């Protein structure tokens, strides 16, 4: 029976789908050595944690790495391709969850929720209410979306049609914009936006995209929301801007180092919301991601290529390794 190794427990519906198709095993730990060891006899690995490149050198039976989600930065693509291992993902299935998080974060920052909640609990009713004098409405503001894939489009739709925001976006393709959304260059976007949302993938081009110079272009009250990847932001530059009250605040769900160390400066700002990489995690999205990754797994086990194949150049190598799939 084939072994299906998953880095994390799957949604019950996904586990049920895989029952009988193979032996479903949850990794005992997420460190590189443990993952590499436990993947040695695996046929499929379902991925919710970074995989070491060495895993692909020792896992000679491995057919596919199926990403439980959209982002591929957890899979070392060069190592997987060299080993003839298929890589697939389940794009867009958590877009709604992430988009709703963006609106939650923007509202919480504008209504000064952290400060209200803290002082209401510690100092009483009136102390909490005092913060609301400086609170702000969301409607009428300009939200700038960096990256206009499935998540960016979901954010734009909710912002424009649900909250009456002015929506601008920047994307590599600059294709014709949907109704009520305009495209701008990244520099024009950071200058004009009241709320800047990072939805782009982490690439060589986007690493450090929000740097000191671009933060300096932002409005003094601008909010920065990152649901992309931590290294898209220059942390030193953002911390400096927060210390100098150069921007209005930030909501950060992803970080260059995860878990975020408990003594990190981000925890010291009242106008910063820190969450543990949870924007895309809800009961509903976990079901969709789990079912999607189970569907892709079943395709591979049935000697078919996954629908969302992300390294098509590996197919010839894969078919040499597993000739029954030809």
Image (cartoon, grey):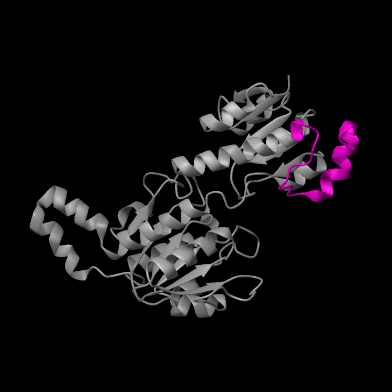
On whether residue 318 falls in the magenta region, the answer is yes
Write down the quadrant of residue 317 in the picture. top right
Residue 56 position in % (x across, y down):
75, 35
Residue 191 position in % (x across, y down):
46, 79
Residue at the outermost top position = 1
Q: Residue at coordinates 38% horizontally, 72% vertically from top-left?
A: 164
Write down the quadrant of residue 3 in the picture. top right
Residue 273 position in % (x across, y down):
35, 55
**Is residue 8 something one can see in this rendering?**
no
Task: Choose between 115 and 16: the one closer to the eye.
Answer: 16
Task: Choose between 326 and 147: the one closer to the eye.
Answer: 326
Q: Residue at coordinates 79% horizontally, 44% vertically from top-left?
A: 81
Q: Residue at coordinates 74% horizontally, 42% vertically from top-left?
A: 306
Residue 54 relative to residue 195: left or right: right
**Is residue 85 something one can see in this rendering?**
yes
Q: Is residue 2 above or below residue 84?
A: above
Residue 49 relative to residue 123: left or right: right
Write down the quadrant of residue 46 in the picture. top right
The C terminus - image quarter: top right
Q: Residue at coordinates 85% horizontally, 39% vertically from top-left?
A: 318
Q: Which contiguous range is marked in magenta?
A: 300-326
Task: Choose between 200 and 138: the one closer to the eye.
Answer: 138
Residue 296 position in % (x across, y down):
69, 39
The N terminus - image quarter: top right
> Could you tell me how many numbered marks the image carries?
0
């Amino acid at each position: 029976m084939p072994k299906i190794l998953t880095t994390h427990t799957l949604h019950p519906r996904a586990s049920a789908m895989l029952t009988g198709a193979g032996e479903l095993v949850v990794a005992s730990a997420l460190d590189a050595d443990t993952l590499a060891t436990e993947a040695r006899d695996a046929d499929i690995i379902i991925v919710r944690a970074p995989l070491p490149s060495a895993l692909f050198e020792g896992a000679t039976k491995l057919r596919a790495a199926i990403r439980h989600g959209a982002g591929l930065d957890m899979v070392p693509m060069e190592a997987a391709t060299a080993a003839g291992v298929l890589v697939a993902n389940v794009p867009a299935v958590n877009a709604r969850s992430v988009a709703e998080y963006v609106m939650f974060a923007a509202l919480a920052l504008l209504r000064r929720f952290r400060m209200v909640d803290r002082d209401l609990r510690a100092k009483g009713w009136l102390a909490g209410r005092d913060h609301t004098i400086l609170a702000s409405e969301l409607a009428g503001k300009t939200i700038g979306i960096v990256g206009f894939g499935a998540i960016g489009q979901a954010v734009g739709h909710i912002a424009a049609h649900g909250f009456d925001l002015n929506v601008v976006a920047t994307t590599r393709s600059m294709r014709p914009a949907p109704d009520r959304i305009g495209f701008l260059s990244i520099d024009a976007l950071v200058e004009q936006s009241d709320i800047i949302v990072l939805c782009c993938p982490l690439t060589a081009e986007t690493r450090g995209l929000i740097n000191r110079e671009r933060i300096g272009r932002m409005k003094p009250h601008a909010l920065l929301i990152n649901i992309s990847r931590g290294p898209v932001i220059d942390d030193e530059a953002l911390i400096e801007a927060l210390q100098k009250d150069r921007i209005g605040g930030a909501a950060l769900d992803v970080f260059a180092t995860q878990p975020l160390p408990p003594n990190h400066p981000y925890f010291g700002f009242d106008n910063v919301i820190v969450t543990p990489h949870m924007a895309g995690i809800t009961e509903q999205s976990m079901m969709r991601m789990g079912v999607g990754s189970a569907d892709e797994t079943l395709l591979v086990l049935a000697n078919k290529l996954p629908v969302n194949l992300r390294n098509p150049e590996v197919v010839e190598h894969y078919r040499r390794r597993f000739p029954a799939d030809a």
